[in-house]
Amino acid sequence: METTALQPWYRQFWPWFIIALPLTAVIGGIATWIIAAHNPDGLVADDYYKQGLAINQTLDRERRAQALGLSGLVRIDATGRRIVLTLEGRIDSQQRGDLVLHMIHPTRPHLDHDLTLHADTGNTWSAPLDRTAPGRWHLQLEPRAGDWRLTGRLALPEQQQARLQPND
């Protein structure tokens, strides 16, 4: 008659396999909680009601840009340190002042920043470009008074220029 020596439970495969399944779920849950705690959702707006009411003002600014026949081309110079805007359409003498280009990251609001474009010769404006991270960017161009607005998209570093137009 053969006798097999029984091994203690901690030296066998199946108990460890059964323990490993719920243990991986616990570790995954802790990792998910840590990621959620350190990266809060930046897409939820606290003042969504006010933003909803302000949509009519935004539409009026875009209609004004369309009525003026405004469009623009934003391009990054060869060195990558300057952004240049060429604006087309009926530009009033009052609008020859500084323009503001809002660079908005779609998912990371802490990367958003504004550039003040100073008037150059003709219908061109420019500003230094120093801290723009690679990725996709939503662009909004408007004068300081906020009379009109043009929008566009730019994907850095693949794109070096973007067309700005009023939304239809």
Image (cartoon, rainbow, N blue to C red):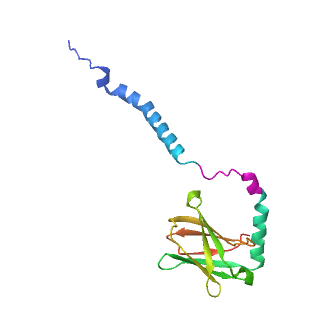
Looking at the image, the residue that sits furthest to the top is 1
Is residue 140 visible in the rendered structure shown here? yes
* Residue 48 covered by magenta stretch: yes
Q: Is residue 64 above or below residue 39?
A: below
Q: Where does residue 152 sit, x and y in percent of width and height?
A: 63, 70
**Quarter of the image holding residue 11?**
top left
Q: Is residue 111 above or below residue 75?
A: above
**Quarter of the image holding residue 84?**
bottom right
Residue under the point 45% across and 31% down: 22
Which image quarter is the C terminus in? Answer: bottom right
Q: Is residue 38 left or right of residue 151?
A: left
Q: Is residue 62 left or right of residue 85?
A: right
* Residue 67 covered by magenta stretch: no
Q: Is residue 101 left or right of residue 132?
A: right
Q: Is residue 6 above or below residue 162?
A: above
Is residue 107 visible in the rendered structure shown here? no
Per the rendered image, the range of residues in magenta is 41-52
